[in-house]
Amino acid sequence: MATAKKVSAIKNTPKHLLGIQNLSVLEAKEILTEAKSFIKLNRGSSKKLDILRGKTQINLFFEPSTRTQSSFDLAGKRLGADVMTMNMSNSALKKGETLIDTAMTLNAMHPDIIVIRHQDSGAPNLLSQKVNCTVINAGDGRREHPTQALLDALTIINRKDNIEGLKIAICGDILHSRVARSNIYLMNMLGAEVNVIAPKTLMPTGIDNLGVKSFTDMKKGLDGCDIVMMLRLQNERMQGSFLPSKREYYEFFGLTPEKLKFAKKDALLMHPGPMNRGVEIDTKLADDINVSLVKEQVELGVAVRMACLKLYCK
Amino acid sequence: MNEKILMNLRIIDPSQKMDEIGNIVIDKNGKIKSIGKKTDSSKTAEKIDLKGLIAIPGLVDMKAFVGEPGFEYKENFRTLSQAALAGGVTSIVTMPNTKPIIDNVSMVDFIIRRGRDKAKVNLFPCASITRQKEGNQMTEFGLLKARGIIGFSDVNKTIQNTELMSRIMNYASDIDVLIMQHAEDYELARNSCINQSEVATRLGLQGVSDIAEKIIIERDLSLLSEYPCRYHINQISSKNSLDVIKKNKSNGIKFSTGVSINNLSLNQNDIGEFRTFLKLSPPLRSEEDRLSLIEGIKNDLIDVIVSDHIPEDEESKRLPFAQAATGSIGIETLLSLSLELYHNESLPLDKIIKCLTINPAKILKINKGTLKEGSDADICIFDLEKPWVVKAEELKSKSKNTAIENRKLQGKVKMTFLNGDLAYSN
């Protein structure tokens, strides 16, 4: 007896969120629209949905992380998924197991989503080739951190309504920053003009070809900017001497109320965290609620991750 | 062995500036008896008609890695010689980065004996320049040479210490040994796995600037003018290095230079999204660099094309790019991929063959890479036009890490003769 095939039984090839580079404008906008709808929910008293009920989400963190990890954790739980967070910085990998082995092991447990953070650029790409569930990149080496860029975009949209036509400055350790790269791609895609500002030793080769203007002078780089994104000085990724001292860095590249004046009057300040207060940013400025969007970034991070989980886990 | 006549071939032998249709007669001892239009053979000679094919001297590959001893799971003498012969390569300079490293006399005896028993090609082993390739203490150049070591190389490592390098050159100049340097400054290259470029920025990988290569070449050539020894730069990868080489050659400094076929045929864009088989050292660089290397061959600034054959098992390549092993296999595809440079009109045929035969033989001071009368009948016979597609699974190396999987090539080896014997045919 022939039975009619159900359309839903056909398994779609999993879709991965590996980087903004692989995203189309439409996809990015869809994620942002979806995320907007979760902002209100997250502020309400009942935060639980059942969109991902029955789904299993594994957070695979090879690098220590507080905000991204807890944000993904919470996002999954609020959508009703079963979330397991594995802190891999002291795990099987130290016993010699390779990323692929770990992936195959987890894959055998039939997860629906793996959220991965890894110290090596390209690790999520490799993982996505070997597992048959959705892979979401929560930051790989210095390559990409797509959900951070998306939450930054959402934060800007929330304040300025639109990204198109804005002038955005990204300042600091561009060389080691995946946040910078993802933001350059996304803000460009959404129609902003992007300046990057860094000392020459922290400026990656060929950055201008990514569609930005590069500056080594805060005054010139911040001129006319609506948004100032500060980056953390990534001491843990630095091998050897890139800078004379933190003091000198702060003098020329640390964001102070005086330097912020080079930007537009109503310019807003962002930082992906964690902050090195007194190194890349003045501590009072960081906490100034009239200027700083740092807390909002963290808040909207959950909404963006919920949107990503929902849209990518079908 | 009977006398053989290989008939009606186009014979290209840059060592005697020959490019003509003719016959090759191989005598009973496996030597070339006559070559070219005149045919000096006995009546009983076996005749093989090879009309339409090209004969060149068996290729001399100046840089290949055999897994023995220590890495037999990557490659052994048997699989290496099968791959080599299928690629028309009859003489191989093997690298000493085995386990243990070839840095003492007892290891040389082992490798020569083992190679003689298991390999079906001419092997010319290198020893390391410094003990354990650590860059501290030079190895016994004189003793090692006496036991049959062809040259000295720390393979993927560079002598960083300038004082040591000057002494190595000074000492080597007296006893006529060949020093082969891998040119890369460690500090500049630390943790790098790709050319410093926009590609590196996009992929988020630590890049190395070509200055790391140039600075060592500049240093070594300065030393060389003080201590003239037989000095060879293993592989260069950039236009900047070439400029230094040009300047020094025109100043009369004598040395030789090699390039990997990979750097002549691929560029950094081919790495795509983290293709670890294209993680190489020196790294693939820009298209401009690649084109300048081709010019370098044209202008005789580069003497040798090598396969830089580095077999790696799948496990050491199935890792995030930064962690993955470096190198690709290439000895079997060396000639075919080189012929691509002829077909796309980058280089004339005789120049390519020169860099694969007589030039390396001269640098090594071996009587190979030629079809002159009286020399060993190591001959590569190929079909210049035959199209084929590189399939890793069909390659003979034990490891399948080819950088040119699925590449469409034109020109394929048909037969390889080693000392007059047919060692490979397809």
Image (cartoon, rainbow, N blue to C red):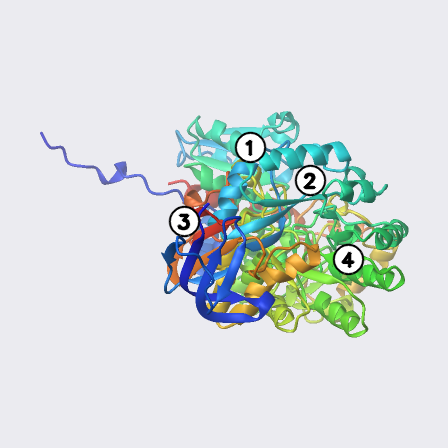
Q: Which mark is residue B73?
A: 1
**Which of disc 2 and disc 4 is earlier in sequence?**
2
**Nearer the camera: disc 3 or disc 2:** 3
Residue B104: give x, y in percent of width and height: 77, 35
Disc 2 marks a residue whose amino acid type is Asn
Neighbour tally class for label 3: few under 14, some 14-19, many 20 plus, Cα within 10 Å: some
Q: In the picture, which quadrant includes the N terminus of chain A?
A: top left
Q: In the picture, which quadrant includes the C terminus of chain A?
A: top left
Marks 3 and 1 close (CB-CB < 8 Å): no
Residue at left offset 64%, top offset 32%: B69
Q: Distance between the residues labelled 1 and 4?
A: 33 Å
Q: In which quarter of the image is residue B252?
A: bottom right
Neighbour tally class for label 1: few under 14, some 14-19, many 20 plus, Cα within 10 Å: some
Question: Considering the numbered disc 1 on the image, is that residue within a helix, a strand or a loop?
Answer: loop
Q: Which mark is residue B231?
A: 4
Question: Considering the numbered disc 4 on the image, is that residue within a helix, a strand or a loop?
Answer: strand
Q: How far apart are marks 4 and 2 (CA)?
A: 19 Å
Disc 1 marks a residue whose amino acid type is Tyr
Q: Are marks 2 and 1 on the same chain?
A: yes
Chain ID of residue with mark 2: B
Neighbour tally class for label 2: few under 14, some 14-19, many 20 plus, Cα within 10 Å: many
Q: In which quarter of the image is residue A159?
A: bottom right
Q: How far apart are marks 4 and 3 (CA)?
A: 36 Å
For disc 3, the marked residue is B425
Disc 4 marks a residue whose amino acid type is Tyr
